[in-house]
Image (cartoon, helix red, strand yellow):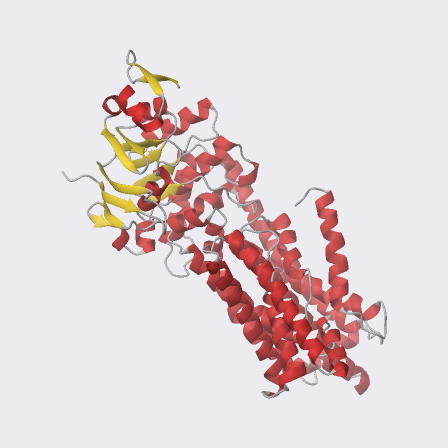
Amino acid sequence: MTPHLVADGLTWTPRGAPPILSDVGFTVPQGQILAICGANGAGKSTLLRMLYRYLRPDAGRVTLGGDDLWALPARAAARRVAAVLQEQPTDFALDVREMVGLGRTPHRQGFAASGARDAEIIAAALHRMDLTRFAASPFGTLSGGERQRVMIARALAQEPELLVLDEPTNHLDIRHQLEVLALLRGLGLTVVLTLHDLTLAAEIADTLLLLHRGRLVAHGPPAKVLTPHTIAATFAVHARVDRSGPTPRFSFHL
Amino acid sequence: MTDQAASLETLRRFRIGAGTALGLAALAVSLLFAVAVGAVQVPLGTVTGVLANKLIPGLVDANWTAGREAIVWDIRFPRALLAALVGAGLGLVGAALQAVTRNPLADPHLLGISSGAAFGAILALLHTGLFLGLLTVPLLAFAGALVAAMLVVGVAGLAGATSADRLVLAGVAVSFIVLAGANVLIFLGDPRAAHTVVFWMLSGLGLAQWAHLVWPLVVLLPVGVWLWLRAPEMNAMSVGDETAATLGIAPARFRMTVFVACALITGVMVAFSGIIGFVGLMMAHVVRLVMGGNNARVLPFSALFGAIFLIWADIVARVVMAPEDMPIGVVTGLIGGVFFVGLLARRRL
């Protein structure tokens, strides 16, 4: 079986600067979760941007279900790939239902108003993220964890095959971090996300990819990828790995 | 959907429906009132009578003088309608620009579009002569607005960024340059004519005529409807450029297109009314307070509120120093500024 998402030889160099990303490739099977980890500036966000079609790679290809993502029209790609980013919406507050409804944008046909099917999909996404009671609340009045759930619900309303998330647990307290990751686990979608917390990453991901200065350090099951050696190469810290539990736990020192 | 959510939804629909009905009624009443009030007071019965007879001749017995009829039909009606059109256009443009730049201060002034229009109009009034007849001023104002918009886009591109905040900064810079250029045009022009131009720049609706109304309308209607149809994209832009891109929108290109559409409306409005401040900036804020942030509502209601607001501002401008007209920009600036301070003090912005 061919993997659902294939990235091959992805390279990006800004004008007059050293490459941000050099020859990075990986595959993700249908319904699995890939976590991308690396130090600040390692090229994680750049790599994600190529997956959600914001930054065209100088070289390399991204294929989803066998289709070259960058050969698809923007709207067609938007019906298959959704992204939850760290951008903060303006205070021109939409309410929660309207925010989730943005996910239907690429599905709109011409000038047709949103139909009953759109309303159903939005209601289902709200329900799934446990947001139904907030549906009419202005987005700006929600807490950080609730906002993040709204953004994920918006991505679900897009009915994507691939969900890309940039640091989805940032600024969340521990309970909300665990909740968001448990929700992602239960979706059954192909997911690619970046995470700073290696313990969380090891817990949620089927495979893990370590990036260092735009190059792939290691890629595979978290327990294999995260060794004191690879962690030292990626983050320039010493790590102690505790493998007594079901997933590895880490402690770090300089 | 839970019962509570359903009832909230019903309530919201009711509010939107009631808001639309109330707004349209207020617009109609404002128009009639604007025609009745002035240096010569005309009874409302005469106003509606003249209007009825113009729509269906002979409907009402004319118990008024021909002079009254001329005041109502030839002078005040076109003026009130021009106020409504200009107010609607400025309100709409402000809301659209704020949406695509994600900047609550964005309006045609800040982004240099108004200055461009003024430059074009001054060029026509002082230097080129009316070589295209009556349409010279609007056409050149329109061209000026478009060129200024292009300059802003070009400068933003020069800075290597088409992001929203860069575009606003580029707009501020271009605005200063173009306004300086406009002042040079005035300085070089015939001093006596220059007096007229300065007066025109201070803005006013006193030159309104039926024959002229068609131009603002012809621009506002199609461009306004087009902007309204783009409301879902504007909503998506409110989250951020990258998220908008993941929803299938090309954010930089979309922002440019909206920018040009706004230049079209602003150009023609400035040509007929001079530079009227604060309407574009203020209306969208007021509407969002009442109606929430969905641009499918913010855009039409900003236009409606803008129309009503400018009709009343013009009434004030005509009445306070009657029989002299006060520049309407003075009125909008005063009311708008004080209103804004009030909102700020109550932390509603």
Would residue B172 appear left or right of B347 to someone viewing this image? left
Residue A216 vertical placement versus B331 (above, below): above
Q: Compare residues A203 and B1 and report the one nearer the observer.
A: A203
Position of residue A148 measured from the top left corner of the image (x, y, whole percent): 45, 35
Position of residue B124 measured from the top left corner of the image (x, y, whole percent): 63, 81
- Residue at 64% x, 87% y is B129
Q: Compare residues B270 and B95 and report the one nearer the observer.
A: B270
Residue A239 vertical placement versus A89 (above, below): above
Numbered-mark total: 0
Would residue B202 appear left or right of A127 to someone viewing this image? right
Furthest residue in direction left, as rendered: A1
Position of residue A59 measured from the top left corner of the image (x, y, whole percent): 25, 49
Question: From where the camera sits, is residue B80 visible?
Answer: yes
- Residue at 47% x, 44% y is A99
- Residue at 63% x, 73% y is B119
Would residue B233 appear left or right of B114 to someone viewing this image? left
Question: From where the camera sits, is residue B210 visible?
Answer: no
Q: Quadrant of the C terminus of chain B?
A: top right
Furthest residue in direction top, as rendered: A244
Choose top left, top right, bottom left or bottom right for residue A52. Answer: top left
Position of residue B202 measured from the top left corner of the image (x, y, whole percent): 74, 70
Q: Compare residues B140 and B157 and report the one nearer the observer.
A: B157
Residue A60 vertical placement versus B21 (above, below): above
Q: Compare residues A203 and A154 and report the one nearer the observer.
A: A203
